[in-house]
Image (cartoon, rainbow, N blue to C red):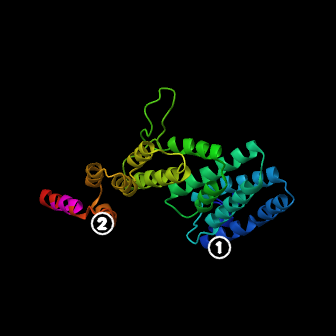
Amino acid sequence: FQDAGPGQDYYYDRDPYAVVQAVANDLEPFFTRADDYRRHDRFHDATTVYRVLIEEIRDHYDQFWDEEGKLSSRASEATRELGEILSEAEDPDLRETILRVLFDAYMWDLDLGGYGIGDWAHEAILEYAAPDERQQVAEWIRDRIPGQIDPPDPYRRVFVMSKDETSSWSSNWKRKALGSFLLDLLADTLDDEKYLRICQATGRITELVERFLERDRLDEALDAAREASDYEVYKLTSIFEEHDAEDALYDLVLNRLDND
């Protein structure tokens, strides 16, 4: 990365697409070494190599023109392989390391805007994490969601996604993505009120309205729908129809039009 990055003759003398392809190709021996470690059940060594590959690609990613996804696909490949190790590894410390690397890769992908780098990480965590590990990942997610989901706890810090984060479309999109991940992780352990708190804190309007309607809490479902965008209200139509409440939503839309 250092030899091929900006500031080097190698970088300026070649087409930027060719530079990225060359760097991606130069990573192949490291993948070969890690794959060999994994085939011989040397899971700690394989994890170290995959982790370094992901972190180095992440740290240098903005220096290269990766429009064709040559580098991001290599990072995605490394997360996929880490997921395979997670499916077999038994050492608790190693598993925690893998989970942390996978989660960080998922968050990096969210920060980029969703390039697909974190897809394998997301799937591996949901498929292979044990119940207690799911709770750990859930805590990492909570620490990245602005605001509080659970009742205030003076001993628990709440982090924002970045120090300059605002209520922009990007941050709202990330908040919703994290909310969906959290709901999937804790699906078997959440009671109604905890489920609803997560939906409210992360802007998961569809799931929030659906759960209210399933529990015959129409007024609260309508309150939630009032906070939704026009597009979200449109998507809610089928849910209200399934619960024979489309007339209530129709009135809400008419009132919104009158107010506009």
- Percent x, y of residue 53: 71, 56
- Magenta segment includes 250: yes
Density class for disc 1 (Cα within 10 Å; few <14, some 14-19, many ≥20) is few
- Prevailing secondary structure of the magenta residues: helix
Q: Which of 164/6 is in front? A: 164
Quarter location, residue 41: bottom right
Q: Amino acid at mark 1?
A: Ala
Mark nearer the viewer, 1 or 2: 2
Q: Which of 43/75 is in front? A: 43
- Percent x, y of residue 194: 45, 43
Q: Which residue is mark 2?
A: 241
Q: Quadrant of the C terminus?
A: bottom left
Q: Residue at x 80, y 62 (%)?
A: 35
- Percent x, y of residue 49: 76, 54
Q: Amino acid at mark 2?
A: Glu
Mark 2: secondary structure:
helix
Which dot marks residue 18? 1
- Magenta segment includes 100: no
The answer to whether the residue labelled 1 contacts the one labelled 2, judged by CB atoms less than 8 Å apart, is no
Q: Residue furthest top?
A: 154
Mark 1: secondary structure:
helix
Q: Quadrant of the N terminus?
A: bottom right
Nearest to N terminus: mark 1 or mark 2: 1
Placement of 10 over or under 194, stated as above or below:
below
Q: Which residues are magenta?
A: 248-254
